[in-house]
Image (spheres, grey):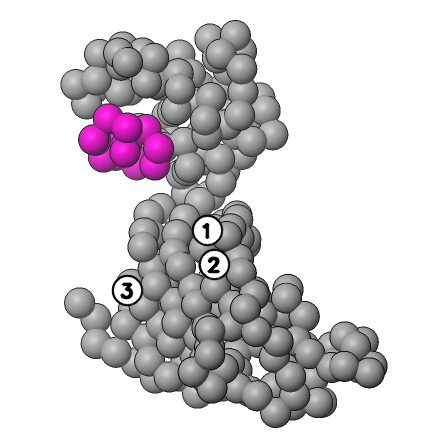
């Protein structure tokens, strides 16, 4: 599984959304991506990629697309 | 590691927000903040739920047992000074098993272990016993909304 597949799988597993909805997905677009879901997603991504994100990046992580740029700061190329 | 603490009922009231009739642990016999807690709940027939569960066979409802264990679990992090007195919400209660009926006059001893506490999301395991016999056990995820709100993306 490459990094993009792992990234998408983390969204699908944590937020229970279909892969076809990921590209445009933003915070609070689906019920599962509330404040609790956001923290579960951040924890799952940190575990999947072996990173620890700064508070500012967690707050800036507002969508699937935005998250790609944030993970790049931690050396995760998608 | 933080030093172990012991909390009587006043200490419990100071550290968490549950109150009568839903404060369902009497004493925290030992807590190592950020690591684990042990608690005690003594049941008498004066509990509000016994007459309704059931009038001919009073025993502690499962949801009350889960709450007893959860209230012990939350002390693992609410005893850290920065989280003292914060309100908590259930995220999930999984793999709960009820191995023994608990009746008036019995005392539930509870063990809670905090596996992870990160940015307002606490994950852990809980187990309990009565007279040395296993009672209720399971896995919990609990949120601290006040902490979670610090990490929300801006709308």
Residue in the picture at 45% in, 33% down: A38
Residue A76 percent location from the top left of the image: 21, 17
- Helix or strand or loop: what does disc 1 sit on? strand
Residue A36 is tagged as none
Residue in the picture at 41% in, 48% down: B121
Residue A47 lies in magenta, yes or no? yes
2 or 3: tag closer to the N-terminus: 3
Q: Which residues are magenta?
A: A43-55
Instruction: Count neighbours of disc 3 (C-alpha within 10 A) and say few if under 14, some if 14 to 19, many if 20 or more.
Output: many
Viewer-nearest residue: B97 or A68: B97
Viewer-nearest residue: A74 or A32: A32
The span from disc 1 to disc 2 (Cα, nearest Å) is 10 Å
Residue annotated with mark 2: B138
Residue annotated with mark 3: B35
Residue B47 percent location from the top left of the image: 69, 84
Can you tell which quarter of the image residue B152 is in?
Answer: top left
- Contact check, label 1 and label 2, Cβ < 8 Å: no
Residue annotated with mark 1: B141
């Amino acid at each position: 599984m490459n990094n993009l597949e792992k990234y998408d799988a983390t969204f699908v597993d944590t937020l229970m959304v279909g892969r076809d909805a990921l590209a445009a997905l933003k915070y609070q677009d689906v019920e599962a991506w509330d404040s609790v879901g956001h923290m579960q997603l951040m924890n799952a991504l940190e575990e999947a990629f072996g990173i620890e994100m700064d508070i500012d990046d967690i707050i800036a992580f507002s969508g699937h697309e935005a998250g790609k740029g944030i993970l790049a700061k931690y050396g995760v190329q998608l | 590691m933080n030093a172990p603490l012991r909390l009587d009922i006043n200490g419990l009231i100071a550290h968490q927000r549950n109150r009568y009739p839903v404060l369902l642990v009497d004493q925290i016999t030992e807590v190592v903040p950020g690591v684990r807690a042990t608690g005690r709940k003594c049941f008498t027939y004066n509990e509000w739920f016994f007459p309704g569960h059931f009038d001919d066979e009073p025993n502690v409802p499962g949801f009350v047992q889960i709450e007893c264990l959860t209230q012990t679990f939350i002390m693992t992090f609410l005893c850290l000074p920065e989280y003292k007195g914060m309100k908590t919400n259930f995220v999930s209660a999984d793999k709960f098993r009820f191995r023994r009926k608990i009746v008036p006059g019995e005392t539930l001893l509870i063990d809670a272990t905090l596996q992870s506490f990160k940015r307002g999301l606490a994950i852990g395991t809980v187990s309990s016993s009565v007279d040395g016999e296993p009672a209720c056990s399971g896995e919990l995820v609990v949120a601290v909304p006040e902490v979670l709100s610090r990490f929300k993306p801006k709308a």
